[in-house]
Amino acid sequence: MVFVVHRLVRLAPVTVTIAGVIAGSAACRAQAGLTPAQVAGIDRVVVNARETLDIPAVSVVVAAGGREWFAKGYGQAHLESRTRASADTIYQPGSMSKQFTASAILNSWDLAGRDRFDTETWYGPGRVLCTVLVGTAGYSGISSAANQNGGDGTVLVSTASLNPAKIVLNFAKDPRKPTMGFADANGATAFARVPSDNHSTLAFKDSGPKHPSVRGFVARALRVTDPQVPQWVSELEAFSEAARQAGEGEAFTQGYQNTLVRLTDHFEAPVTDYAPEVFAKTVDETKVDDPLTRVIQEQVFSKVHVYGDNAACRSLLFDTTALRDRVLQPDRTVLVDLRIRREQTGKVFRLLPLGP
């Protein structure tokens, strides 16, 4: 499992469950033990979400240590009868199914753009404090059939990190002089690769966690405060770098970059029928550098995967142990937004004479 810790309010180990949709205020129960500032903090998060999503009602529960600390309904559960939502409101399938439908329509690319490259920052001090821990050991026994290089047995380490970068290449206006842009994700999230643990043991299953630092990391993630975030992010970066260096001799634990390419035309329509090629050019860029290209193909470039929710997207996996620069960095995802000009040759419409 990828262990993700979100801090939405200043409370000990917290789970926030949102069912339905968000709006104003209503009955509240079980807030004994919470300070007025903590209750106000929960209200503030809900109200901000309501304004952002523009939706009518929600029920929120905060639980920790087997105890319900807070439960409250917001907004109108039934617009026609103006029935206010409560902590126990049961939402009709019509309302709930819209959320699942919206999640299905909003594909991976759109989610990344909204959550990490939006004009509004969602993560970091004053916002959601997020820590991601992911194992690198993979499974043992018969379950090892699911293992792959750069993974924890179930997911890729590079796709678990919530700190992507984005490159925009626009060939639509002039294919010979494309415009280019580069951006890092907004806000800060903490991330660490954890040796010795796999997808299961990291989640405290199968006699896990195996690595002695995991329990301390989880405790720190749940207690970190806004001023401590930069130091916390740096500490986990240093831990991950040391783990990568220690595992450089083993292909399975090396640092990989997931490069997600999306191709669209100048009408912003998806282009689904393409195959990416990876090669290097000589310093003067006049021809292909065959020796370096061979190194890239044999030691760096791993595989291509076509995304099921958007066939215009291709995922390319690169081993950064052999080649690492500003573009190729370990344990992260890079979004590459490619736009081309769709052209039709005149030969398509030319009538050719039939044979004798």
Image (spheres, helix red, strand yellow):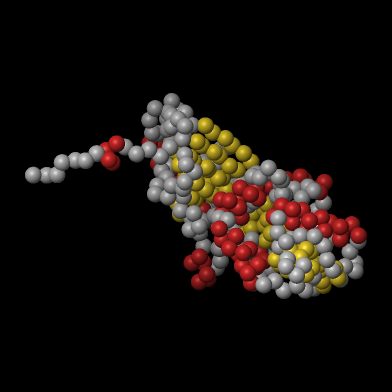
Q: Which residue is found at the position 61% from the left and 50% from the top?
A: 112
Q: Nearer the viewer, residue 178 or 55?
A: 55
Relative side of 33 to 50, left or right: right
Q: Tell me what residue is drawn at x 27 percent, y 38 percent.
A: 347
As drawn, which residue projects farthest toward the front? 80
Q: Quadrant of the C terminus?
A: top left
In the rendered image, is residue 313 in sight?
Answer: yes
When the figure is inspected, residue 135 is found, relative to residue 206, above or below; the finding is above
Q: Is residue 164 left or right of residue 260?
A: right
Which of the pair 306/80 is nearer the observer? 80
Whether 321 is drawn above or below 46: the answer is above
The quarter of the picture where residue 86 lies is: bottom right
Residue 258, how many percent across, how many down? 54, 49
List x then y, in percent, for residue 104. Answer: 56, 61
Examine the rendered structure and indicate whether residue 165 appears above or below residue 197.
Answer: above
Which residue is found at the position 79% from the left and 64% from the top? 74
- In the rendered image, the vertical position of residue 87 relative to residue 295, given as above or below: below
Residue visible at 65% across and 50% down in the picture:
115
